[in-house]
Image (spheres, coloured by chain):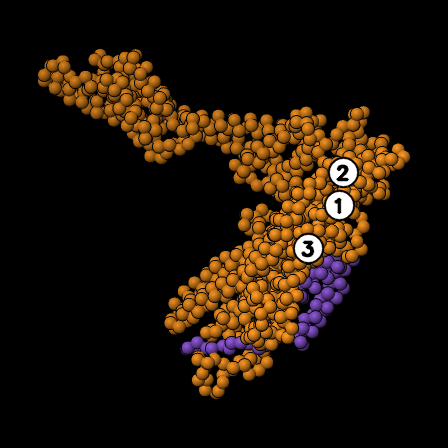
């Protein structure tokens, strides 16, 4: 197994630094596993439980349908579809599936398939029966309405007809004329001799279409029809569409066959349901009682049907989660099995994949168990391969570090085994956030909120949370660190909801004389030692507060920025050391360090010296004249003796370091490349064994073409980026000052202009309103908006200014085949 | 100066505590140590900057009216 030709995997670490947990990716190896077919399924199942093996797709050129296990995947797809149907039905019926019921009885997959099929058929049948019954039920209900309302028409019509009949008889006795109005006669259903044969159609029409219905009937029959409509009070469930619609009961009287066909067609067009009706009153009563009987019968049948269906669904719900999981894992296993290539003898499958070196024994253990459990005669073979491919990057994180690692990964996954900025990000990210957020009152609010999340961790992690809540819950440890550091910086800035406290000793400033006459004109004087911890409380609210704090915070930003950038450059040194890249060490790391520190490191030094000596020198001008007229006399800008010579030396160093970064590396790379090729042509003369070995290397080297111009331009870009970036990145750190200023100003505005104003009125109602407004403004603007804003800017500072000193971030993440991750994926 | 020593001591105490309570292999210990050292250095830097800035100030607080 010990192969010495592994050119990519540098086992020699340069002996500089002992290994540290999250610093570099776990060592990964390319592994080949040969599995006999009968134990393949079980092997994958155990490997899936382990979750430490990333399979490579060996059948990438085959379409999904050409693969070996396409049928199995179809089966799983079918079962998944059935399960989805069940879930829908359960949701419709309002039955929640129990989360537990983790009875670990191993269900046979084939049995489950059959059972699912049966259940589906049953469910579909029950549903369609229900639907039919429901439709009949609705039709009967409508029929009932027709019977009642149409009965009323006929009854009222009849009574008025008999009344008119008597009138006409009375008149007829008087007149003896034959031309009685046709309409009257038509209403006299009880008079058979003079009756014209009338037909009628009765039914229900939707109320909104009633007017149009009437109009079209009138036009179609040229007025030779009589329509009576009556509205139904409650909306009725339409049997066909199943919705509640307001309807009218109608009766249309007509004469003649053609009119009948026309009317029938119109009824169909308008979706008016027709129901038969008899004019005989006795029969009507009979019909009504019959229909009521049928209605109650149907109702009970429907209720029983629903109960039956609910029972089925409830039984399903007990086992639903388990089935779901099983189908999911089986599908995953078959997908993965499809990635393995079938060996020529068709008796075993070959799998290739990446796994961490530390997991070797666990994987071999799983393989053995699978062989034993599947009663296979042949064991699986585990073989480590050597390759030039770049392995995936794998960091073992716990619940605390995973959030920070995700922040780093969002920018780019680390290249295999390069230094992971996540290690320092765990501390520096919350720290920079806190520099911009600095208020211990707000910090305590954040801490309380996040502690609530952390204490209910177990409960919340199994629940399904909304998007925003999910993000906040995932970042709870980040927010906790942010809150802790904010409390610290709040104490240093001396701001508690923008109110300072004199907690760490006595303030350094006092009035010049006991009457404090000059306090508002000339100011206080420094009578004691500087305030021991943080900003002196006397500054708050004074007129010179902003000039002082601005100067302090700007200089602090520069100092912190230079420190973080130096850390970045030093990490690039560790990378160079780890990969034994001495070119990078001598011709990149050292000139970069010199350039940055001779300019901005010197600026930091000047800041500290100015503070320590209390000099009045203007650092702005010091830096500018250092470049413009370095040989001139410094005059009042002199901070320490020998400054002029130091500045000249530093300027020279900075100037040399630029070509130092630019030229040597491409030239030396070209020399190296030529040497390697030169060396090759010599060794081919040697004996055949060695030449075979070199052949392989020779081939691989042929792939590495060396374009000098490309390399040079690359180095040029890198140099320019660094040089210009040194200035712009340092200035970028000034956002620490800007956001901190914004936060403290907002906070003091809310305090003074809301709370104190409300207090000044001496009125309870206004005070309460003021407090409410203050709380809402604090939470909305300061705790939510400012948090997000500071988070974003701290993130940017890490991603750009810190990481572009050393981070390449072009790796890919280790994505093992794991059942635990499947569950997250689906949700 | 005194406070610097306090910070230093606090850092040492914190790292000793962590090593005692959750010692889990050499690489993990180094990791925890790195975190604590980084945190101590950051906190100390912040304190030191603010302290140095107030040692020999160039301006003094001029109170505003009505204070």
- Inter-mark Cα distance, 2 to 1: 15 Å
In the rendered structure, the colour chosen for chain B is purple
Quadrant of the frame with the C terminus of chain A: top right
Q: Secondary structure at mark 3?
A: helix
Q: Residue A209's x, y, as percent? A: 32, 28
The color chain A is rendered in: orange
Q: Chain of mark 2?
A: A
The residue located at (82%, 34%) in the rendering is: A695
Q: Residue furthest left?
A: A174
Q: State the residue in front, A402 or A524.
A: A524
Of the pair A452 and A695, the residue shown nearer to us: A695
Name the residue tied to disc 1.
A671
Classify residue A34 as left or right of residue A140.
Answer: right
Residue lying furthest front: A631
Q: Label 3: how many residues lie within 10 Å, few (<14), some (14-19) or many (20+)?
A: some
Q: Is residue A458 at all visible to an observer of this figure?
A: no
- In the picture of the structure, the residue carrying the numbered disc 3 is A660
- 2 vs 1, front mark: 1
* In contact (CB < 8 Å): disc 2 and disc 3: no
For label 1, the SS is helix
Q: Are marks 3 and 1 on the same chain?
A: yes
The answer for which chain carries disc 1 is A
Q: Quadrant of residue A392?
A: top right
Residue corresponding to mark 2: A701
The answer to which quarter of the image holds residue A391 is top right
| Mark sitting earlier along the chain (2/1) | 1
Query: How far apart in space, not on screen, are marks 3 and 1 (Cα)?
Result: 17 Å
The local secondary structure at tag 2 comes to: helix
């Amino acid at each position: 197994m010990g192969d010495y030709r592994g050119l990519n995997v540098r086992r020699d670490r340069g002996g500089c630094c002992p290994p540290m947990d999250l610093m570099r990716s776990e060592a990964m190896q390319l592994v080949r596993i040969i599995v006999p077919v009968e134990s393949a399924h079980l092997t994958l199942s155990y490997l899936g439980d382990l979750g430490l093996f990333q399979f490579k797709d060996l059948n990438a050129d085959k379409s999904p349908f050409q693969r070996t296990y396409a049928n199995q995947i179809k089966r799983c797809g079918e079962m998944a579809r059935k399960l989805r149907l069940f879930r829908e039905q359960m949701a419709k019926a309002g039955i929640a599936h129990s989360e537990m019921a983790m009875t670990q009885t191993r269900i046979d997959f084939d049995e489950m398939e059959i059972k699912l099929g049966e259940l589906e058929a049953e469910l579909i049948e029950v549903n369609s029966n229900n639907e039919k019954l429901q439709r009949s039920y609705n039709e009967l209900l409508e029929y009932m309405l027709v019977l009642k309302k149409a009965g009323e028409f006929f009854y009222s019509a009849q009574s008025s007809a008999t009344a008119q009949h008597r009138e006409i008889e009375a008149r007829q006795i008087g007149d003896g004329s034959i031309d009685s109005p046709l309409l009257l006669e038509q209403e006299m259903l009880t008079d058979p001799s003079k009756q014209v044969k009338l037909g009628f159609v009765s039914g229900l029409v939707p109320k909104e279409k009633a007017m149009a219905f009437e109009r079209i009937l009138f036009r179609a029959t040229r007025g030779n029809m009589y329509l009576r409509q009556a509205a139904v009070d409650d909306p009725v469930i339409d049997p066909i569409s199943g919705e509640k619609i307001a309807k009218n009961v109608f009766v249309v009287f007509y004469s003649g066959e053609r009119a009948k066909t026309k009317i029938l067609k119109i009824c169909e067009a308008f979706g008016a349901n027709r129901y038969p009706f008899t004019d005989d009153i006795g029969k009507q009563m009979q019909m009504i009682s019959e229909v009521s009987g049928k209605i109650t019968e149907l109702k009970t049948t429907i209720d029983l049907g629903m109960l039956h269906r609910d029972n089925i669904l409830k039984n399903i719900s007990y086992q639903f989660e388990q089935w779901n999981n099983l189908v999911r894992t089986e599908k995953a296993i078959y997908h993965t099995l499809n990635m393995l290539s079938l060996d020529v003898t068709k008796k075993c499958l070959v799998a290739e994949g990446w796994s961490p070196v530390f997991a070797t024994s666990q994987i071999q253990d799983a393989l053995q168990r699978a062989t034993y459990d599947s009663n296979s005669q042949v064991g699986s073979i585990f073989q480590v391969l050597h390759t030039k491919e770049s392995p995936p990057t794998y960091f073992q994180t716990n619940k605390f570090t995973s959030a920070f690692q995700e922040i780093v990964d969002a920018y780019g996954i680390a290249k295999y085994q390069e230094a992971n900025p996540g290690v320092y990000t765990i501390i520096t990210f919350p720290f920079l956030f806190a520099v911009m957020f600095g208020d211990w009152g707000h910090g305590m609010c954040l801490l309380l909120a996040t502690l609530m999340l952390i204490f209910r961790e177990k409960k919340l992690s199994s629940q399904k949370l909304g998007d925003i809540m999910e993000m906040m819950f995932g970042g709870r440890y980040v927010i906790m660190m942010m809150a802790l550091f904010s409390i610290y910086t709040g104490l240093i800035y001396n701001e508690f909801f923008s109110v300072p406290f004199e907690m760490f000793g006595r303030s350094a400033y006092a009035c010049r004389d006991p009457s404090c006459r000059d306090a508002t004109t000339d100011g206080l004087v420094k009578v004691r030692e500087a305030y021991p911890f943080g900003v002196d409380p006397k500054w708050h609210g004074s007129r010179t507060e902003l000039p002082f704090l601005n100067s302090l915070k700007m200089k602090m930003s520069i100092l912190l920025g230079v420190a973080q950038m130096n850390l970045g450059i030093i990490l690039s040194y560790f990378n160079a050391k780890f990969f034994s890249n001495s070119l990078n060490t001598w011709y990149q790391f050292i000139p970069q360090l010199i350039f940055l520190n001779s300019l901005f490191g010197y600026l930091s030094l000047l800041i500290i010296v100015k503070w320590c000596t209390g000099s009045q020198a203007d650092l702005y001008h010091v830096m500018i004249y250092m470049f413009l007229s370095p040989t001139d006399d410094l005059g009042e800008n002199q901070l320490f003796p020998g400054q002029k010579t130091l500045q000249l030396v530093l300027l020279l160093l900075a100037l040399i370091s630029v070509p130092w970064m630019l030229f040597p590396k491409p030239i030396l790379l070209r020399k190296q490349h030529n040497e390697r090729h030169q060396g090759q042509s010599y060794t081919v003369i040697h004996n055949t064994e060695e030449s075979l070995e070199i052949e392989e290397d020779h081939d691989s080297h042929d792939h590495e073409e060396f374009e000098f111009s490309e390399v040079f331009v690359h180095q040029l870009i890198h140099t320019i980026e660094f040089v210009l970036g040194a200035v712009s990145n340092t200035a970028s750190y000034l956002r620490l000052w800007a956001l901190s200023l914004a936060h403290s100003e907002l906070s003091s505005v809310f305090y003074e202009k809301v709370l104190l104003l409300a207090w000044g009125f001496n009125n309870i109602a206004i005070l309460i309103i003021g407090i409410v407004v203050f709380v809402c403004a604090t939470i909305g603007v300061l705790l939510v908006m400012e948090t997000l804003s500071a988070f974003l800017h701290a993130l940017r500072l890490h991603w750009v200014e810190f990481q572009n000193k050393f981070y390449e971030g072009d790796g890919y993440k280790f994505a093992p085949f794991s059942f635990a991750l499947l569950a997250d994926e689906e949700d | 100066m005194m406070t610097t020593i306090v910070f230093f001591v606090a850092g040492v105490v914190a790292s000793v505590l962590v090593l005692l309570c959750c010692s889990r292999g050499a690489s993990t210990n180094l990791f925890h140590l790195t975190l604590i050292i980084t945190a101590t250095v950051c906190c100390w830097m912040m304190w030191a900057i603010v302290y140095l800035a107030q040692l020999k100030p160039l301006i003094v607080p001029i109170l505003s009216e009505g204070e």
